[in-house]
Image (spheres, rainbow, N blue to C red):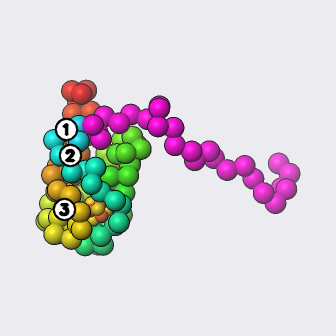
Amino acid sequence: MIDFGYKIQTDRQIDYDSNDRQILEFVRRGEPSIDWCMSCGTCASACTAAVTTEYSLRRLIILARRGMNREIVESVYRCRFCGKCFNACPRSVNTRNIVYLMQLAATKISNHEI
Ligand code: SF4
Ligand code: SF4
């Protein structure tokens, strides 16, 4: 292949119509405070799991809004349920319950229950 000094990048646009937002809707029904999240990242900076892994609750919520469920399933089980994120959140989002419900939804999707 001829090297022109540039290349075409993979398309990174998010198609909200085709993405599956089952996890977001499941969490929303059980914990409406997920909609209060403003993606500030304070929870991620306080997170126990983030010390040793790539885990980020802020990212998980963004992924849920985008309907990127596969990426959620890959990391949602890393949470230690320590609750530090809940104490740190400036919007009083019930973070621990959100992670719990995301895990529940991910398990149900894997078992074809929802
Ligand atoms: S600290 Fe609260 S508002 Fe900020 S990203 Fe985390 S959950 Fe969202
Ligand atoms: S409860 Fe989970 S997401 Fe929250 S700080 Fe602890 S390990 Fe991180």
Which circle marks residue 29 in the picture? 1
The residue that appears at 23% across and 37% down in the rendered structure is 26
Mark 2 CB near ligand 1 (8 Å cut): no
Label 3 close to label 2 by CB (< 8 Å): no
| Residue 20: % across, % down | 38, 34
27 w.r.t. 38: above or below: above
Question: In the rendered view, would you say 93 is above or below 21?
Answer: below
| 64 relative to 12 in the view: left or right | left
15 up-or-down from 71: above or below: above
Q: Mark 3 and mark 2: span between their CA atoms? A: 12 Å
The quarter of the picture where the C terminus appears is top left
Q: Are marks 2 and 1 in contact (CB under 8 Å)?
A: yes
- Mark on residue 32? 2
Which contiguous range is marked in magenta? 1-25
Res. 102 image quadrant: top left
Image x and y of residue 53, in percent: 32, 65
Which secondary structure, mark 2?
A: helix
Q: Main secondary structure of the magenta part?
A: loop
Q: Is residue 15 magenta?
A: yes
Q: Indicate yes or no: mark 3 CB to ligand 1 under 8 Å.
A: yes
Work out whether residue 18 can be spotted: yes
Task: In this rendered view, identify the residue nearer to me: 10 or 95.
Answer: 95
**Three-letter amino acid code at disc 2?**
Pro
Query: Residue 92's mark?
Result: 3
Q: Count numbered badges in the picture.
A: 3
Q: Position of residue 87 (x, y in %)?
A: 16, 69
Q: Amino acid at mark 3?
A: Ser
Classed neighbour count for the residue bearing mark 2: other residues with Cα under 10 Å, few (<14), some (14–19), many (≥20): some
Residue 75 appears in the rendering:
no
How far is the residue under mark 2 from the one under mark 1? 6 Å
Residue at the location (20% across, 46% down)? Answer: 32
Asked if residue 53 is among those painted magenta in the image, a careful observer would answer: no
